[in-house]
């Protein structure tokens, strides 16, 4: 389960917000390029924990831009609870079912997959199930705040479009096979991290931690990543 903490100052949030356009521009270019030959396409948008059943707020700007630049598109909001239990299996099923059912009636249809936070995990879990015509129909995958973020993948970028999170694992990475190798060239997996001095916990304990900031304007979601394989607990 993701752990939500509030460690960032307003200044830190502002810095991250101003850094965000780099991967947004990259994703916009990727989507436009990959859908160029598609007469019709669907952006499957999978929201994060606690967001209401609709398009995730973090993707509305880029989706509006894409649909303005490229006709024939629609946005489908994945139907699932997005609850704090982090059980995203229903979202994964809905993504797969939406693609397979659409292709039965429209074999030339194209798709873009987007996922934020828990929605990114649901999207990653769907990828191994999308093979053959379904794999070919998905032209790009854009993830932000992916808890299944795996170190060392070429699709890993930070909020500046750089490589500071290239070799960082997400909080659920050990529990997930991650993005399949054949999907990496189609994917942008965006996250960022800082190392705070310490996180004060109840009962006089301090957790030395690395924090991954999952940036979706205008909100920032953070999940803790241990510095080592297990968190180091120190007495104050």
Image (cartoon, grey):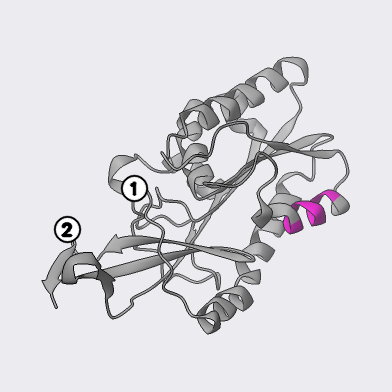
Question: Residue beneath label 1, please?
Answer: 172
Question: Residue at position x 33%, y 61% from top?
Answer: 224
Expressed as whole percent of the image width and height from the top left, the position of residue 41 reads 77, 36
Residue 178 drawn above or below residue 149: above
Residue 205 lies left or right of residue 200; in this view the side is left
Q: Residues within 10 Å of mark 2 (few under 14, many from 20)?
A: few
Residue 173 lies left or right of residue 86; in this view the side is left
Question: Residue at position x 37%, y 52% from top?
Answer: 150
Residue 235 lies left or right of residue 71; in this view the side is left
Residue 185 drawn above or below residue 86: below
Q: Residues within 10 Å of mark 1 (few under 14, many from 20)?
A: some
Q: Secondary structure at mark 2?
A: loop
Q: Along the line of sight, which residue is nearer the eye, 127 or 192?
A: 192
Residue 116 lies left or right of residue 149; in this view the side is right
Q: Main secondary structure of the magenta part?
A: helix
What's the mark number on residue 230?
2
Expressed as whole percent of the image width and height from the top left, the position of residue 133 reads 62, 24
Q: Earlier in the sequence, mark 1 or mark 2?
A: 1
Q: Secondary structure at mark 1?
A: loop
Q: On the image, which quarter does residue 159 sit in?
A: bottom right
Q: Which residues are magenta?
A: 61-67
Alpha carbon distance from label 1 to label 2: 13 Å
Expressed as whole percent of the image width and height from the top left, the position of residue 151 reads 34, 57
């Amino acid at each position: 389960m993701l752990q939500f903490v509030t460690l960032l100052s307003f200044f830190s949030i502002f810095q991250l917000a101003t850094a965000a356009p780099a991967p947004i521009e990259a994703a916009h270019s990727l989507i436009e390029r990959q859908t160029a030959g598609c007469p019709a396409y669907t952006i499957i948008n999978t929201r994060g924990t606690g967001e209401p059943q609709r398009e995730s707020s973090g993707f509305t700007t880029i989706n509006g831009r894409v649909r303005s630049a490229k006709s024939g598109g629609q946005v489908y909001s994945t139907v699932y609870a997005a609850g704090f239990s982090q059980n995203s299996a229903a979202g994964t099923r809905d993504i797969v079912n939406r693609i397979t059912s659409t292709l039965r009636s429209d074999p030339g249809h194209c798709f873009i997959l987007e996922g934020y936070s828990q929605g990114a995990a649901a999207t990653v879990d769907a990828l191994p199930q999308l093979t053959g015509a379904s794999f070919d129909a998905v032209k790009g995958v854009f993830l932000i705040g992916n808890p299944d973020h795996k170190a060392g993948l070429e699709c890993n970028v930070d909020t500046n479009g750089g490589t500071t999170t290239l070799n960082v694992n997400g909080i659920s990475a050990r529990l997930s096979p991650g993005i399949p190798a054949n999907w990496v060239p189609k994917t942008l997996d965006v996250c960022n991290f800082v190392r705070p001095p310490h996180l004060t916990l109840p009962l006089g304990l301090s957790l030395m931690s690395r924090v991954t900031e999952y940036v979706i304007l205008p909100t920032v979601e953070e999940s803790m990543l241990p510095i080592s394989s297990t968190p180091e607990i120190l007495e104050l």
